[in-house]
Amino acid sequence: MTIDNSPNGHAVVVGAGPAGLMAAETLARSGVSVTICEHKPSVGRKFLMAGKSGLNLTKIEDDASFLNAFTEAKPLLQPMLAGFDSVAIQKWAEDLGQTLFTGSTGRVFPTVMKASPLLRAWLARLAGAGVQINTRWQWTGWHGTSLAFATPQGQRTLGADVTVLALGGASWARLGSTGEWATILRGQGIDVAAFEAANAGVAVNWSSHMAPHFGAALKGIALRSGAYRSRGEAIIATKGLEGGGIYAVSRGVRDGHPLVIDLLPDQSVEALIAKLDRPRGRMSVSNYLRKAVKLDAAKIGLLQELARPLPQDSRVLAELLKALSIKNAKLRPLDEAISTAGGIPFAAVDETLMLNARPDVFVAGEMLDWEAPTGGYLLSACLATGRWAGQHAAARVRNV
């Protein structure tokens, strides 16, 4: 079956994550008829998962600092992020009935600390604009000039004046981001960079001695790996280390650098030496470290796990506390990563995010080859690129 285009212009958005929904909203606001096709039974699954940790919508900070989070993709994403910045994102969410608050680090969250109310309001807005959503429609490529889908009713095709692909990266496949679209596009001669884990936990093969510390937080630490630095927390998990502090330096680990942890970043080596030179008496090593330098049980457990037997020399021990290294650190598997690097290079699209090799087809969100740390940057860029692709797709329809 082929669904004919609307006389007013018809757009198909493939993928119903935040980038796809934003593209659909932008197209509909421009008067274009929009059909969203999503291969899962419901929309916004990864968006809802993000809401379980509060739904960090964006971050309020100076423009330069915000853009620097996007490293190599900064100059390419700059106009898109400027066109839908943190102020605009907040207004958009508030217009959908969400009250927001800004945390001490500038991160912006809905007051309810979850995604479902915002998603419900967003879907109601799209329905009111006439946007049609087809779920369980898996995109399989093109049949002639039409988009082809595998559906519960068999093979279907949709004609479109413009298409926005917003199929996500390749992590959390059970939520919809399988990365299978890369094979389709490569078959069309479109370059797709290999996917790699971003914002991922670090795998550590713990001994049984660490079991009592599973789930414990390492607070007040600093981490580094290669050029990347963080003062965030880490969680001791059964398979390694997780949490915002780890994710922020995971790119360095991915690039082959050791993960180095400063257990006491607010104290100098010399200050620690002075404390460690005090008489130990009959205290155990754990009690000595707890009393002398205020290490908690989780930090002591990590120190002993990675550096046992501990050095007796105060300077060597102090330097170890300031630079505890996991030399052969590896990231957890790609599917466990919060986001992915890789995807469609910016060289494969023009300044409007239209594929050079496929006119009238735009891409948005994590399909593009960019990465950023957690903390509001990921969702901001997905929304901004979705809006940008939607704007230019709508302009393309008008100019045909």
Image (cartoon, rainbow, N blue to C red):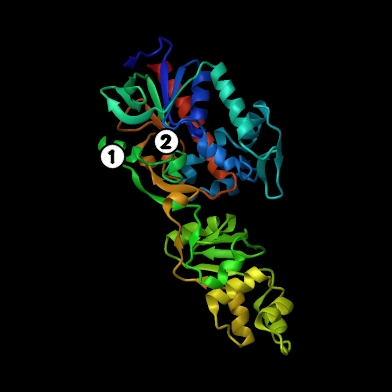
Residue 84 rendering spot, x and y as whole percentages:
57, 33
In front here: 137 or 71? 137
Residue shown at 48%/66% (left/top)? 204
Q: Residues within 10 Å of mark 1 (few under 14, many from 20)?
A: few
Looking at the image, residue 284 lies above or below residue 43: below
**Residue 115 position in % (x across, y down):** 61, 36
Element under label 2?
Answer: loop
Judged left or right of residue 288, residue 79 is: left
Quarter of the image containing the N terminus?
top left
Residue 269 place in picture, x, y as percent: 65, 78
The image shows residue 274 at horizontal and vertical percentages of 71, 83
Q: Can residue 264 be seen in this view?
A: no
Find out whether the residues at labels 1 and 2 contact each other: C-beta distance under 8 Å: no
Q: Which label is found at residue 3?
A: none
Q: Which of 182 and 82 is in front in this view?
A: 182
- In this rendering, the answer to whether 154 lies above or below 342 is above
In terms of sequence position, does the residue under pointer 1 or pointer 2 come before the other? 2
Which structural element holds mark 1? helix
- Real-space Cα separation, disc 1 to disc 2, in angstroms: 15 Å
Residue occupied by mark 1: 186
Total marks in image = 2
Q: Is 225 left or right of 153, judged from the image as shown?
A: right
Quarter of the image for the C terminus: give it: top left
At x 71% / y 33%, what residue is drawn?
Answer: 99
Mark 2 closeness class: few <14, some 14–19, many ≥20 residues within 10 Å: many
Q: In this view, does 284 lie above or below 114?
A: below
Report whether residue 207 is seen: yes
Kind of residue at disc 2: Leu
Q: What residue type is labelled 1?
A: Arg
Q: Which mark is residue 167?
A: 2
